[in-house]
Image (tube, grey):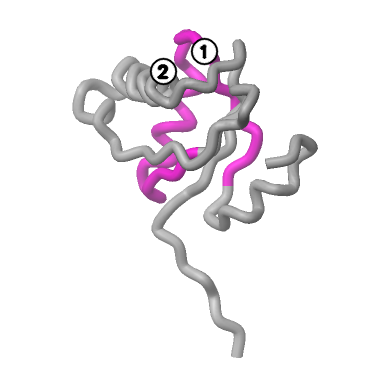
Amino acid sequence: MARRLVSTYRYIRFAVSPPCADALTLRKTIQDALGQSFGLVSSHTYVDLLWISDEGTAVVVRIGENDAPKLLAAVTASNATPRLSLVKESSFLPALLSVDAPI
């Protein structure tokens, strides 16, 4: 009998342009994007920055399953700097390893 791993989180890997290794700046960029697209209440969505590359060119975030579509839409519509671009998203964190750049 196969067991399924259930996760209540989505893990999302973004490319960052221009590079930024400052966690507060990246968190503020995400918060501003959510606020711009969905208002004040959504701007306070719980988002964890799990990893930022040493060069500041990539970031991995964890967000609730129900809030992930909002984050992806907000980042797409945002014109804030630094610019975040979706690389990969999954409910299984190790799945984000299969991109060209090492994590």
| In this rendering, the label closer to the viewer, 1 or 2 | 2
Residue 29 lies in the magenta-colored region: no
Q: Secondary structure at mark 2?
A: helix
Q: State the residue position of label 2.
A: 25
Residue visible at 60% across and 16% down in the picture: 19
Amino acid on which disc 1 is placed: Pro
Residue range in magenta is: 61-89
Mark positioned earlier in the residue sequence (1 or 2): 2
Q: State the residue position of label 1.
A: 82
For residue 86, say whether it is visible: yes
Residue neighbourhood size for the residue with mark 1, other residues' Cα within 10 Å, grouped as few (<14), some (14–19), many (≥20): some
**Front residue of 28 and 4:** 28
**Front residue of 41 and 24:** 24
Can you give x and y, in whole percent of width and height, for residue 10 in the image? 48, 49
Residue visible at 67% across and 41% down in the picture: 103
Amino acid on which disc 2 is placed: Thr
Side (left or right) of 101 relative to 74: right
Side (left or right) of 48 relative to 42: right
Residue 74 lies in the magenta-colored region: yes
**Front residue of 64 and 102:** 102
Whether residues under marks 1 and 2 lie with C-beta atoms below 8 angstroms apart, the answer is yes
